[in-house]
Image (cartoon, grey):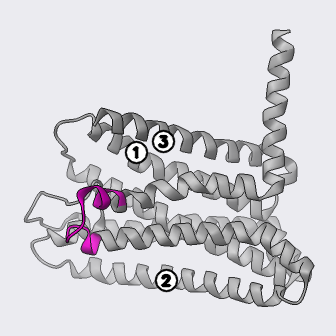
Amino acid sequence: RYLAFVLFFILYLFIVFANVIIIVVTARENALHEPMYIFIMCLAVNSLYGSAGFFLRFLRDLLSSSHLISRPECFVQIYVIYTYGSFELSFLSVMAYDRYVAVCQPLHYHNKITKKTRVSVLGFLSWFIPLYCMFMNSASLFGVKLCSSHIGKVYCVNWMIVTIACSPPRVNSMIAYFNILLYFGHFVFIIWSYIYMIRSCLSSKEDQRRFMQTCLPHLISLVVFSVTVLLDLMYMRFGQVNVSPHLSNFMAIEFLLIPPFVNPFIYGFKLTKVWNRIASVLHLKRKVTCQTLA
């Protein structure tokens, strides 16, 4: 248990460090004040948000002999984790739209994307809609009477609360289905936009190179997020049936571990412009430190 605490604590520190670097470099470098990099910074902020919502409670539970959580704390955790997932898909959708316009409609890119008002509106909607939808989802479940106090997962989720409710929460089910359709629509749009971009880039080697440089990282991030969400859904439905405890626990938490850990590598190392700025900032800090010591 203590070894697990140390390992997960180190992992959490790395997630915080890597994503803070992305945020700081993007915020301070004027050359990165472009829509694509601003949305990458938003993904990094969301990684910090989702990681804090999971790790702070999880690390405390690793050191505790009793794993009890109050009802308000449980619903706060549900809200944070669900908004984290919704934010992630929202920003991936906006980034897909950004790349779609840049690749398929480059002459209209300035009017549709680069204006500050457009970026502000897209960013605002990407934050506000998940906050509102997940608030309605959590609020509709808060007053439900529970017939059990055991949650078969390492963190609170909506589905587990529904399974221990004394009666089916119909309002929550309706809201949940609406949210599922909404974000499934996001996913379909992302897939459609990348298929269209790939088809558009087949005729030109220059377009193929640009796609590999700027669009492939977003596509990899989408695949990572989608696979982890799929495994998490499989765990909730089948996690306790003929599956080892270690695999079940991994399937339960990888949704909150892998994307925040992998995204800084995907965007920091694959996108040359971001990596060059990170390297220059780190080199500058090292140079200043050496001069101070001298």
**According to the image, label 2 marks what residue?**
184
Check if mark 3's residue and mark 1's residue have beta carbons within 8 Å.
yes
Q: Nearer the viewer, residue 22 or 176?
A: 22
Q: Nearer the viewer, residue 101 or 14?
A: 14
Q: Quadrant of residue 135?
A: bottom left
Report helix, strand or loop for mark 1. helix
Say left or right for 82 vs 17.
Answer: left
The label shown at residue 55 is 1
Q: Secondary structure at mark 3?
A: helix
Q: Residue at x 48, y 71 (%)?
A: 227
Which region shows up in magenta?
236-250
Q: Mark 3 belongs to which amino acid?
A: Tyr
Q: The residue tagged with tag 2: helix, strand or loop?
A: helix
Question: Which residue does the image show at 37% across and 57% down from the upper left?
Answer: 253
Q: Residue at horizontal 53%, vertical 85%?
A: 185
Q: Which residue is mark 3?
A: 12
Q: Along the horizontal axis of the image, is 223 left or right of 248?
A: right
Please rate how many residues cluster around mark 3, counting C-alpha atoms within 10 Å: few if below 14, some from 14 to 19, many from 20.
many
Q: Quarter-wise, where is residue 98 in the image?
A: bottom right
